[in-house]
Image (cartoon, grey):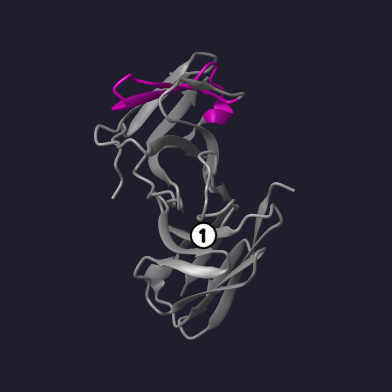
Amino acid sequence: DAKTTQPTSMDCAEGRAANLPCNHSTISGNEYVYWYRQIHSQGPQYIIHGLKNNETNEMASLIITEDRKSSTLILPHATLRDTAVYYCIVRATLRVGNTPLVFGKGTRLSVIA
Amino acid sequence: DTEVTQTPKHLVMGMTNKKSLKCEQHMGHRAMYWYKQKAKKPPELMFVYSYEKLSINESVPSRFSPECPNSSLLNLHLHALQPEDSALYLCASSQGLAGGQESDGQFFGPGTRLTVL
C-alpha cells in the first residue's frame, strides 16, 4: 500500500511556482522521498528524491520538513508542459538493495495559461 | 543511451491469442520491472527481475508470464487474456536491487497499450 497522501488535483497559473504537498507521516529512517510525474499516455518520469535535506535540480526543488513527515515539490516556473500527474513515493534503501516503487494516487496538476 | 524502449506501442489481441511484449535497455541496469496501469489509476507493480532472476511476483495470474533472456531484455508473454486485462503495460529498469544505492531511481519506458477483445 502507498504510504503517502497527496491532494487529488491542483491548478497553477503558467509562470507561477507550483507547490505540491505530500504527507508521509509513517516514513521510517531508511526511506527516501521520491517524486515522479506522468504526462498523459507516457511512462512515469523521475523528478527528484531526498532523505532529509532539501534538494534542488534542474527540474524542481524538494523541501522536506525537519520531522520528515511531509514534503513539498516546487516547480519554480510552471509551464503548460508541466501538466501531469505527480506521484510522491517513499521507498526504502536497504543495505541489501532498494525496494520497487509503489505508486499512490498522485496529484493531477493542471497548469493554466 | 538512457532510454527504455518497449515494443509494440499498441497491441490488440483476442482472448485466444498468444502475444509478447518486449522491453530493452542498454544502461547496464540489473533490475527490470513490469507494471500494469489501468485508465486513470496509478501504475501497479507486477514483476521484478534482479540479475535476470525473478525476485518479486505480485500474485499475477499465470496468463502473464515474464521472461528475462539477458540483462538487457525483458519480455512479458500473454496467453488467454481477458478484456479486463486491457491496460498500459510499463517496463522500467534500475541499477539493481542488490547493493543498491540511494540514487537508484527507476527509468520507465513509454509503455505498450494493450486492448483485449
Q: Is residue B67 magenta?
A: no
Question: Where residue B62 sits in the image (x, y, percent)?
Answer: 40, 79
Question: Where residue A2 sits in the image (x, y, percent)?
Answer: 31, 46
Image: A74 above or below A104: above
Residue at x 46%, y 35% (from the top left corner): A35
Which residue lies most toward the front here? A95
Image: B85 above or below A48: below
Residue nearest the viewer, comparing B11 with B58: B58
Q: Residues within 10 Å of mark 1 (few under 14, many from 20)?
A: many
Which residue lies most toward the right here? B1
Which residue lies most toward the left here? A26
Q: Quadrant of residue B19?
A: bottom right
Residue nearest the viewer, comparing A71 with B10: A71
Q: Which residue is mark 1?
A: B33
Image: B27 above or below A18: below
Report the chain holding disc 1.
B
Disc 1 on helix, strand or loop? strand
Residue at x 58%, y 30% (from the top left corner): A81
Residue at x 40%, y 43% (from the top left corner): A91
> In this image, B73 relative to A91: left or right?
right
Can I make out residue A93 in this image?
A: yes
Can I make out residue B38 in this image?
A: no
Question: Where residue B56 sits in the image (x, y, percent)?
Answer: 42, 65
Q: Which residues are magenta?
A: A59-82
Question: Where residue A101 sits in the image (x, y, percent)?
Answer: 43, 49
- How many numbered callouts? 1
Kind of residue at disc 1: Tyr
Image: B91 above or below A75: below
Q: Is residue A70 magenta?
A: yes
Which residue lies most toward the bottom here? B16
